[in-house]
Amino acid sequence: MTSVRTASHAGSWYSSNARELNKELEEWLSKADLCHGPARAIIAPHAGYRYSGPCAAHAYRQISPAVIKRVFILGPSHRVRLSKCALTQMKRYATPLYDLVIDMEVNNELAATGHFQWMSADTDENEHSIELHLPYVAKVFERYRDQFTVIPILVGSLSTDKETLYGQILSKYLADPENLFVISSDFCHWGGRFSYKYYEPSAGPIFKQITQLDKQGMDLIELLDAEGFSEYLRETGNTICGRHPISVLLNAVKALKKSSQNGFHPLMKFLKYAQSSQCTSPSDSSVSYASAALLMD
């Protein structure tokens, strides 16, 4: 088996041309303000860059790459049903800009807990939720390209108990200021092709109702309310595809709060929200994108 994961979605979901990709990323990042950093964790979308690239820049702009040595990337599994979290068996992840090096030491530490499985090469190559973050990571860290490693974690359809468990396992890494967590998630997938049409016909335009629905979830995430976010998902069924990675992060923060001996003041803030299109008819469809950053004092 090859030890390098190819950039399998380059050329379709984002540009495979390094110069063109670099120009796009620079433009989007230049238009985003550094207003909530340095981030210990970010939430950012993983759709094709023509849709989500500008939104993602608002999260990536909050990163201070000089202090980061390890980047954990938690993405939801779209193609393979998992009840656990899975680690890569690759040694490097390719991007059109340069290859990212996998942190084998941390990978092995996580595997030693007995709670992780290994991704197959096919699962690794076919999943886009992690790959769509790799060019952004490469761009933001380009001046420090030989000074950091990445730890990709594919997150399955976890029970609330398992979200708590993985949050506890990862909390010690989140506590380390040399670590960054990237949480990969789009927000509401609305329309017939997503089998989700949560709206009230008398309550105004559909796209505004979608915004309100997403805002409910975003407010709970900003409150770092793991239980409240889980209850919101049960009540609304909102199709936030990275709900499990988000919940793992919220539970990691919760675990740190419990174990902290001193004042601990995490602060999550959403910085940008967008929709792929504005739904006005039940026959329409859209995907929502949101970017956030978590500060740790």
Image (cartoon, rainbow, N blue to C red):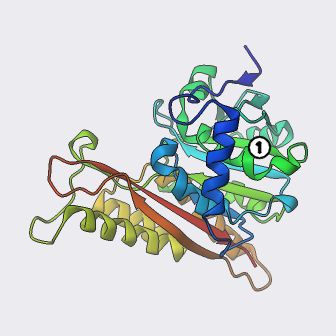
Q: Quadrant of the C terminus?
A: bottom right
Residue 10: x %, y % from top left? 59, 30
> Which quadrant of the figure has residue 177?
bottom right
Question: Callout 1: helix, strand or loop?
Answer: strand
Q: Residues within 10 Å of mark 1 (few under 14, many from 20)?
A: many
Residue for badge 1: 150
Residue 65: percent from the left, percent from the top?
81, 58
Near-viewer residue (130 or 47): 47
Looking at the image, residue 211 lies above or below residue 115: below
Kindly give the residue lying farthest to the bottom in the view shown: 263
Q: Which quarter of the rendering shows the N terminus? A: top right
- Rendered location of residue 216, percent (x, y): 37, 72
Q: Residue at x 59, y 73 (%)?
A: 268
Q: Using residue 119 as the reference point, say whether residue 284 is left or right of it.
A: left
Closer to us: 231 or 60: 60
**Residue located 31% across and 53% down the image:** 277
- Residue 70 lies, in percent from the top left, at 81, 50
- Relative placement, left or right, of 296 versus 46 is right
Q: Is residue 38 above or below residue 97?
A: below
**Which residue ends up furthest to the left in the rendered image?**
202
Number of marks in the image? 1
Residue lying at 54% horizontally and 32% vertically, measured from the top left: 127
- Give the residue at x 52% y 44%: 49
Q: Quadrant of residue 112?
A: top right
**In the rendered image, the vertical position of residue 22 relative to residue 123, given as above or below:** below
Q: Amino acid at mark 1?
A: Val
Is residue 85 among the parts visible in the rendering? Answer: no
Q: Is residue 272 visible?
A: yes
Residue sitting farthest toward the top:
1
